[in-house]
Image: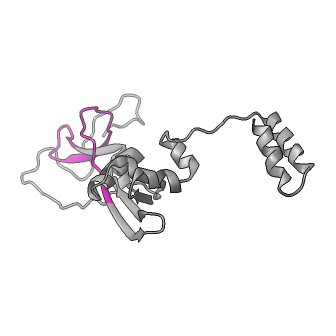
Amino acid sequence: MESYTKAKPVDLPPPKLVRKPKHETTSGVTLYILASFSEISFLGTEDLPGCKTSTTICFLANDPTMAEVTATIRTRKFMTNRLLARKQMVVDVLHPGRSSVPKKEISEKLAKMYKVTPDVVSCFGFRTNFGGGKSTGFALVYDSMDFLKKFEPKHRLALKGMFEKKKVSRKQRKEWKNRMKKVRGIKKAKVGAAAKK
């Protein structure tokens, strides 16, 4: 410990400790650390100079050699939906040491679990719990690619690169809407079809 109150700092031993004690004393200390703590740091022990004591210091984990922690996937509320030709479930992902897990990685692991290809697995709605270390979302495992294209919403198909939205300008949409207002009943379909051509 250094004293900064004096003009010249003086090295002082820690309070209530002897520089060279005659016998060693050990004490059992339990550290309770949140799982999310490991996302940014790890613990190391350093010896203090001149004393037979040590202190635990938190280091930032900027070292690229540190191994990436794997994620554990658990499914619950499993249901086989025959009407939509799919299996649906809630997915819990345990990932201590990682901020989140990519959906691609989750779909690959689920595909291995259910013995299907990753392209028929759809994962969405993942939210990380407060404090990190765990995320919860939904997954759908379709029977085939055809059923996936038939029942999945277009925005999720677009994320997989299976659907491309037609870009129509705002002006064209407004003109089409105003043309539709002028007719009633089944004539709207004819006006709409003519406008699309």
Question: Which residues, given as a range, are shown in magenta?
Answer: 45-73
Q: Nearer the viewer, residue 62 or 141?
A: 141
| Side (left or right) of 123 relative to 178 | left
Residue 104: horizontal and vertical position, in percent?
Answer: 39, 45
Evaluate whether residue 22 shows in this view.
Answer: yes
Q: Nearer the viewer, residue 146 or 102?
A: 146
Residue 143: horizontal and vertical position, in percent?
Answer: 38, 58
Q: Is residue 28 above or below residue 161?
A: below
Residue at point 37% right, 52% down?
36
In which quadrant is the N terminus drawn? top left
Q: Nearer the viewer, residue 155 or 185?
A: 185
Residue 81: horizontal and vertical position, in percent?
Answer: 44, 69
| Side (left or right) of 22 relative to 53 | left
Residue at point 75% right, 35% down?
197
Residue 17: horizontal and vertical position, in percent?
Answer: 20, 50
| Side (left or right) of 77 relative to 194 | left
Q: Is residue 23 above or below residue 43?
A: below
Residue at point 90% right, 50% down?
181
